[in-house]
Image (tube, grey):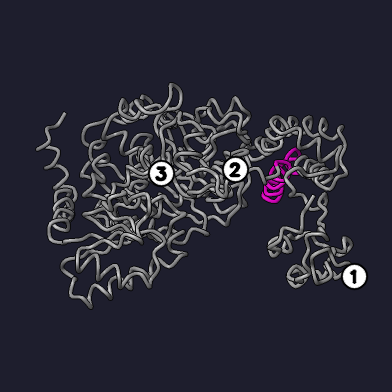
Amino acid sequence: MKSVAELNAVRAKSLKSIVLRKGAEAMANVQSDCKYNVLVCGGTGCTSSHSEQIVEKLNSEIAANGLEKDVKVVLTGCFGLCALGPIMIVYPEGCFYSMVDVNNIPRIVKEHLVEGKPVTELLYKETVAEDGSIKALDETDFYKKQIRVALRNCGVIDPEDINEYIANDGYLALAKVLTEMTPDDVIKCVSDSGLRGRGGGGFPTGRKWALTAPNKAPQKYVVCNADEGDPGAFMDRSVLEGDPHCVIEAMAIAGYAIGATLGYVYVRAEYPIAVRRLQIAIDQAREAGLLGKNIFGSGFDFDMEIRLGAGAFVCGEETALMTSIEGNRGEPRPRPPYPAVKGLYNSPTTENNVETFANIPQIILRGPEWFASMGTEKSKGTKVFALGGKIEHTGLVEIPMGTTLREIIEEIGGGIPNGKKFKAAQTGGPSGGCIPASLMDTEVDYDNLVAMGCMMGSGGLIVMDEDSCMVDMAKFFLEFTVDESCGKCTPCRVGTKRLLEMLDKITQGKGTLEDLDKMEELCNYIKANSLCGLGQTAPNPVLATLKFFRDEYVAHVTDKKCPAGVCKDLLTFTIDKEKCIGCGMCARSCPANAIVKTDYVAPGHKLPSYEIDASKCVKCGACIGTCKFKAISKK
């Protein structure tokens, strides 16, 4: 084992123009020379809400007030609390400004940055104590139970500045691997940590690397799956936007461990910010000697490239992804042979997703025991979830495996808006299943979800309240899967279409009880006989809803009613003539001109009431939203 002094000497020599010490000193100078550091979220969500214009306005106001030497503005990655974007945090106080508008900037600059008085009413309310003092973010419900490993630098550093990554222990893990560890040591470290793949079924990462390493070939590859096609999932995108260097460092470590010299990041083209920042990071790493030939003077060569995907969900499956990288139509391949033996360009290949790689540098630096100390017996570490749907705090959270769904929904997520009741949470997107309210105290980990007929997937978590129809939800995800099927195998290509036809019948009130049994039988056939993971998991939303919400299916079939009032073919909109005051607001809002005036005037009212022509009604619900007297109902 080399001493700290010896290791520092190796790093300084190998990095040449950018040494680790220089990066750390640069960050220290920023902290000491500037009175304020202003971090503005530059993730996709906040960018869509004009965070870049906020940065421009900040810089202009700072210049106008002569604060250039006192204030540093940094556009970072995602802070996590997307529901409150655009977000801006001012240090050293840690003032968390939420839902910032460009018009707020002059006041914030004048009162906070010039006069030293935070604009309290613009701060996230949970960060302001009763006495007006500012609370730390980790004291708020959203953040206090989180442990950030994969997201540790997101919202903290400038993702386009390699010096800031280096100053936060960036590339130290790669230095340690190349100067102190053998490839077998690295694989053992990852295996001992208990890290499982964060992109699907949770295959042990160390085992995957160990299967690839012994295979002899002139060329091996490391592939990063950043396709992330699940509706509502944006974990991988946020890591690439906020901390792209951690993925580069981890892929180089994986390359060293398995004997690969080239890596590919397969990222969907719909992620322009992630693609741009990743390319900047790759270019910076090459310039610094952290990618390319003879890294750290060790004799180890590793380089990487980006490949853009066209948005096909099936390319999230590893063999289809590799086929796409090769320039062919993204279709899965039969296995065996597995990619560890015959993967990209018929060479041994290791493939992991972005979040899996994001954990690697910290495992190397802190040790496998540290990572294994978090989580459950069989699901170690933390997991990033994208909270969406009917929940107060939509956004990204990273929590220890084993955290209960109740904690995620009620405490971290802030509960269900508008006083509604929690009904279910969909995990794993189109490949997953739903967790009902009766199982809210279940610890969320790989094995518990599988036991319920669900799966972790990449980490999308869609929350549904009492107004959600579970039959319609299953239909929504199945429609997505049918559309995204590559069509290569019959069970998926034909079976999912037949399944969707049955669901259509049920939501139209034309289904039978026999259809429910046929659906279960077909689901099990598709799972058992499909070629790849897309087809094998496509029936999961249907099976899970049949298991936990069969009564809703029965109501659609026998009563011809949708209990949640969602399925349009089973709805009837009516106007209570006794409540209707004849204002006509509903008629003016109806896009189908289906609401007409009657001759009836209710007692106590002066104008004739209205009624709905069922033959013209498109059941859009616009009339309900405009009626202030609750005279319109749907049944």
The residue labelled by disc 3 is: 142
Distance from the alpha carbon under mark 2 to that under mark 3: 23 Å
Q: Nearer the viewer, mark 3 or mark 1?
A: 1
Q: Residue at x 37, y 54 (%)?
A: 124
- Mark identifier at residue 429: 2
Distance from the alpha carbon under mark 3 to that under mark 1: 55 Å
The residue labelled by disc 1 is: 599
Seen from the viewer's position, the closer of residues 538 and 401 is 401
First in sequence: mark 2 vs mark 1: 2
Seen from the viewer's position, the closer of residues 58 and 78 is 58
Query: Is 473 colored magenta in this rendering?
Result: yes
Q: Can residue 254 be seen here?
A: no
First in sequence: mark 3 vs mark 1: 3
**How many numbered callouts?**
3
**Left or right: where 337 falls relative to 181:** right
**Labels 2 & 3 near each other (Cβ < 8 A):** no
**Left or right: where 171 falls relative to 325:** left
Q: Residue at x 44, y 49 (%)?
A: 264
Label 1 neighbour load within 10 Å: few <14, some 14-19, many 20+: few
Seen from the viewer's position, the closer of residues 26 and 280 is 26
Label 2 neighbour load within 10 Å: few <14, some 14-19, many 20+: many
Q: Position of residue 269 (x, y in %)?
A: 52, 59
Q: Nearer the viewer, mark 2 or mark 3?
A: 3
- Secondary structure beneath dot 3 equals loop
Distance from the alpha carbon under mark 2 to that under mark 1: 51 Å
Q: Position of residue 532 (x, y in %)?
A: 64, 37
Label 3 neighbour load within 10 Å: few <14, some 14-19, many 20+: many
Which is the main secondary structure of the residues drawn in magenta? helix
Q: Which quarter of the figure has residue 488?
A: top right
**Magenta span:** 470-493
Seen from the viewer's position, the closer of residues 309 and 369 is 369
Q: Is residue 407 above or below residue 192?
A: below
